[in-house]
Amino acid sequence: MFADDTKLFRIIKQEEDTDALQRDLTKLESWSSTWLLKFHPDKCKVLTIGDLDKIERPRARLYELENIILEHVSEQKDLGIYIDEKLRFDFHLQDKINKANSLLGLIRRTFTCVSREVLIPLYTSLVRHYVEYGGVLWSGIANRAQIRAVEKIQIRAVSLVEGMQDLDYGEQLQSLRLTTLSARRARGMMIEMWKHFHIYDKDTVGKSFRPGFSGRRNFECHRLRSIGKQCKTFYAAAGVAWNKLPIDVRLSPNINTFKARLDRCWNNMPITYDFLAAPPWMILDDNGEVPLLE
C-alpha cells in the first residue's frame, strides 16, 4: 500500500486476510484524522506481489480509504525503483535503459570530440548510474535478456570512443580500464554485504539470513535457508558469493580496505570482461544447474 511514502502490507492467503488489511486501512485513516495528517486516496495504490492464483478470490476485494476505492496497479515506483507484481523489474529496467540511451544520444550529438578523455568521464558520471540504480536489488534475479539489454548501454558508449571500433567488447574494456556492468553489480552486492555486518543495525538484516560456521573450511559463513523464488533474492545470491571470499577479505577493517582486497581477489574473474559469464554466486552442480541453498 502506497500513501504519501507510507506503506501498509499484509500476507494474503485467504479472504479473511483481506478483511484484516481493510481494518488496518481503517485504523490508518483514523490515525491520520487524529493527527491532522490527511492522506490523498487518489494517490494511493494497491500492489499485489506474488502468485494470485494461489489466493482465494484475489480480485474480489476492493480496498477503501476515506470511502474512496483505491486503484489496483501492476507496478509502482518507490524510491526510484519500479516494483512489479512478479518482481521481474522489467518496467524498471526498460525505464532506466530508455533514459540512459536518451542521454547517450544527447552526448553524441553535442560533442564532436569523442576521445576517451572526453567520452568516458561523461559516460561514467552522467549515464552509467541510470542502469546501475537498484542493481543490488534486481541483479540476483535478472535473466540473460535483461543483462544483455543493460550491458548494451555500455557497449554503445565505449564503441563511440575513437579507436575502439576495431576491437571486441572485452578488449575495449581493458583498453579503457573499465569492467562489465555485471561485474560492477556483483562488486556492489559484496559491498552491501560488508555493510550489513559492519555498519548496518542488525535489525535491518533479514531474519532468514543467519550466520553459521563451516567446520570444513574453518571460518564463519552466512547461509540463507530458502526455496523457490527466495533463492534469487539479494541475500541468497550475495550470501553464496560472500562465503566464497577469503576470510581476510570479509574481515576487512574498513570499506576502502574491503574494496581493495575484493578487487585483488576478483581480478581474474571471467565476468570482469564477459558480461554473460557466470556470476560469483552461481554454484553449478554436475548437471550444470544452480542448486537450491540449504
Image (tube, grey):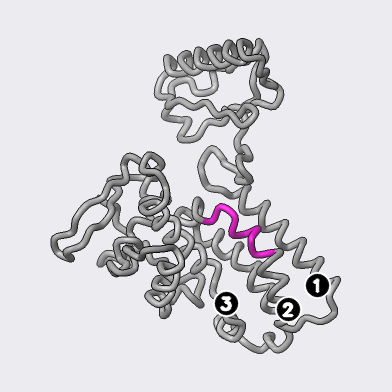
Label located before the other in sequence (2 or 1) = 1
In terms of image quadrants, where is residue 250? bottom left
121 is higher (above) or lower (below) than 61:
below
Extreme-front residue of the structure: 253
Q: Nearer the viewer, mark 1 or mark 3?
A: 3
Q: Residues within 10 Å of mark 1 (few under 14, many from 20)?
A: some
- Location of mark 2 (residue): 160
In terms of image quadrants, where is residue 63? top right
Would you say the magenta stretch is mainly helix, strand or loop? helix
- Rendered image: mark on residue 108: 1
86 is higher (above) or lower (below) than 189:
above
Part of the protein shown in magenta? 127-135
Residue 66 image position (x, y, % from top left) = 65, 12
- Rendered image: mark on residue 14: none
Residue 141 image position (x, y, % from top left) = 46, 53
Residue 292 image position (x, y, % from top left) = 29, 52
| Residue 69 in the figure: left or right of residue 284 | right
Q: Residues within 10 Å of mark 3 (few under 14, many from 20)?
A: some
Residue 132 on the magenta span:
yes
Label located before the other in sequence (2 or 3) = 2
Q: Secondary structure at mark 1?
A: helix
Q: Secondary structure at mark 2?
A: loop
Q: Residue at x 66, y 55 (%)?
A: 96
Q: CA distance from mark 1 to mark 3?
A: 20 Å
Amino acid type, residue under disc 3 in the picture: Leu
